[in-house]
Amino acid sequence: MSHVSLGRLSNAEVSQIPGNLPALEDLYGRASPKLRDLLQNIFNLHLLADLLSAGAARSDLSEITTQSELLDSYWRHRVRREDGRQDDRETVLTVIANRMIDTQELRVLRADVRLHVASDALVDLERQGILHAEDQGGRPNEDVLLFNHHVLFDYAVARLIFPRGRQPERLVSLLSARRELSLMLSPSLTLALTDAWNVGADRTPFWELAFALGATSDLPGVAQLAAPTVVVEHTKDLADLTPVLECLKQTGARRDAAENVARNIVGALFVRMNAGVPLVGPSAGPWMEFADQLTSLGQDRLMLAALALIANAVNAL
Amino acid sequence: MTATPEQIASIGHASRDLLRFAWLREPRSELLVTSSLIGVGRTFATDPQASAALLREAIAADHLKQHGYKELRWIAQEIIPIAEANPSLAVDIYQAAYGFAETSDESTPMGSSQILSLRSNRRQDYQGAWYQLSEAITRILCNDLEAGVRAVARSLLGYVQRERRYEHHSHEPSLDTFVVWGTANFEADWSSSWFRGGFQPNQDAPVLLKKFEDYLDRLATQDGAEAKFTRILTTLANEPHVVAAMWASLLIAGTKHAALYAHRLVPLASAFPLMLSSDTRFQLGNFLTAAFEYFRESDRETIERSILALPDNPIGNRAKVVLAGCVPRALISSAEMRTFVETLAQGGIATECSARAHHQFDAGIRHGCVSCIRRCSADGSGQRVAAPIDAAGRGSHGRQRRSGPFARFGQTAARRSQEASSGADEQILRQARGYAC
């Protein structure tokens, strides 16, 4: 087996690709910086090109800024569609994803699923490029099915097993019951959280899920850090953090959950900082304001968390 | 990446909250305290008033005694931004830091390495803060001259009060005032012994004094040196306590750069406390020798009359003879001074201005040996000679007071005094005998 490692595409490389696809060239020309950044990932570029060739409206696509939104768009065009068979197709994908989770393998035997699903929906998904047969020595092995890309598996789980984070109890129960899945399902959890983050001005679904995860002390660290990581990635100003700051002023279990989330946000910031993203600077985000808010609460564990941020920032002054 | 002003403001506010919390927290977390202190210092300008209030708590006497060895160095580390935002606080930090000395040798951790676990002690840790403050003082002097001068003056005062509280010579001023554009203060400090005697401490506030003198030396080559020197004088004149060593430093600068500073230092050159104190008399004498040619005629007369007006007591009379000897003969302006010097010469009491003579004088005062103070040669040449000083600072005549070589001098002086013709001369020689015997 050979592996080819593909890094992020350079701007020059991305600009070469649309030449063969005028619609992509046009979209790329009008794309926001965030979308351009997204398209430096060759898989995302492939998804977008696929959507364009499927006739998706360029105006809709140009609004995309996150991978979650890109996948949602892809899902609507390739899985749900408007032919009234979306439930059959999603049932197929749910069965396959569950089977993969149970076996902890990203492959499934066609024989194990075909008895539980509509065969035509399964075939349809293969034709749409969501699923494909395993490659065996250059020839397809029809007995084994795979998702076309592991990101599609991640998104299928986020959408069908985690219902995009809209049912926190169910999601937390699954992760608590099967702690060993946390690593495998971590990308799906992040996609579900990202999807929830983009819902509503107050992001209620996201924070409900974040606090549910924060309140569960027996979850593995990777699951505890998922929501804070999304917060760190997507927060633009202090108002985005109002729910957690408000919860910290309350008492009871919800406050304790918020405290865990706040402390893990600090942890996620350090992970990001170690990857080269500074804590301060014009585009660094409202993290010093956040630390300031934490210290104003005068609570021991929050003080220590804020201290880590402040001490680090002071060193950079 | 550079923090934005808003981010710096947040860091400052958070640091202050953290420090308040850290001081109240039980058990105390050194990491919390020190990190917060650094934050408060580095973001001082974000809220000078609130930051100053916190740092003043940190330098309060009781707090400093209890936690100074752990905290002061972190404040000292940030003294430059503090001085830029609040010079008055910086001065208070220097004053507090040098007003107390940690003496405990109790072991303290040095770093947190589990592999190479080094230890220090409370005294060394506290002295580390002194080192940082001394390293910063030159920059503070350059950035804010008045604050820097006050910081040095108050630090030295603290040092003298801690370490150099000795009984003073009778008739020498311990506390006194003189006029420099107002009333200036003078406190004897024994710096003739601990700073001007050859050895200079390499720790504590004397290091600041050394850096202050270095600064004065460099200042002479800079634009606006005279104006800055005047500001230094004005600042010191307004200080409630100024130890002798500070005034001596100005006189040394005046000696080295007489053409530049001579006329600025006229008030010091005619100040009784500086003339009488063994902590400043030597520097004043040297200054007179170097600077007299640059004085105006009227200033020369003022200085000469001041010398002659020194009090009629052993110290005053001795200082009168020494300082008169420092005035270049050819430049003497007043008839009174000329008469005084000539009379001394006729009486066999030659005047001389030299380091050795001054030290001899001071050593004599210190251990009470008049013949060590100064004597005339017995050969009648009028050439004054100084008895050698041993390692303990005593003259070769030990504690002789009125016998041996001195007695010979007394006889010579008495014989010559008989030859003096006028009543005024007799008065001068009587005083000179007071000086000599």
Image (spheres, coloured by chain):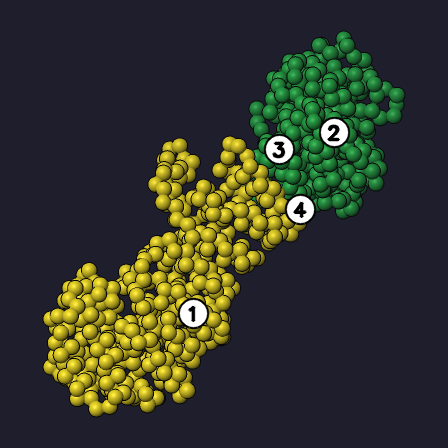
Chain colours: A green, B yellow
- Chain of the residue that carries numbered disc 4 in the rendered image: A
What residue sits right under mark 2 in the picture? A206
What residue sits right under mark 4 in the picture? A283
Q: Is residue B84 left or right of residue B363?
A: right
**From the viewer's perspective, is the residue at label 4 or at label 3 nearer?**
3
**From the viewer's perspective, is the residue at label 2 or at label 1 nearer?**
1
Q: Crowdedness of circle 4 by 10 Å Cα count: few (<14), some, many (20+)?
A: few
Q: Which sits in the foreground, B133 or B230?
A: B230
Q: How far is disc 4 from disc 3 in space, using C-alphas? A: 29 Å
**Type of amino acid at the residue the image marks with label 3:** Gln
Q: How far is disc 2 from disc 4 in space, using C-alphas? A: 23 Å
Taking the spot 12% from the left edge, 70% from the top edge, the residue there is B403
Q: How far is disc 3 from disc 2 in space, using C-alphas? A: 25 Å
- Residue lying furthest top: A115
Q: Which sits in the foreground, B302 or A29?
A: B302
**Type of amino acid at the residue the image marks with label 1:** Thr
Q: Position of residue B93 (x, y in %)?
A: 49, 53
Per the image, label 3 sits on a secondary structure element best described as loop
What residue sits right under mark 1 in the picture? B177
Q: Position of residue A287 (x, y in %)?
A: 65, 41
- Chain of the residue that carries numbered disc 1 in the rendered image: B
Where residue A296 sits, quadrant-wise, is top right
Taking the spot 23% from the left edge, 80% from the top edge, the residue there is B430
What residue sits right under mark 3 in the picture? A299
Q: Crowdedness of circle 1 by 10 Å Cα count: few (<14), some, many (20+)?
A: some
- Chain of the residue that carries numbered disc 3 in the rendered image: A
Q: Position of residue B307 (x, y in %)?
A: 34, 79
The C terminus of chain B sits in image quarter: bottom left
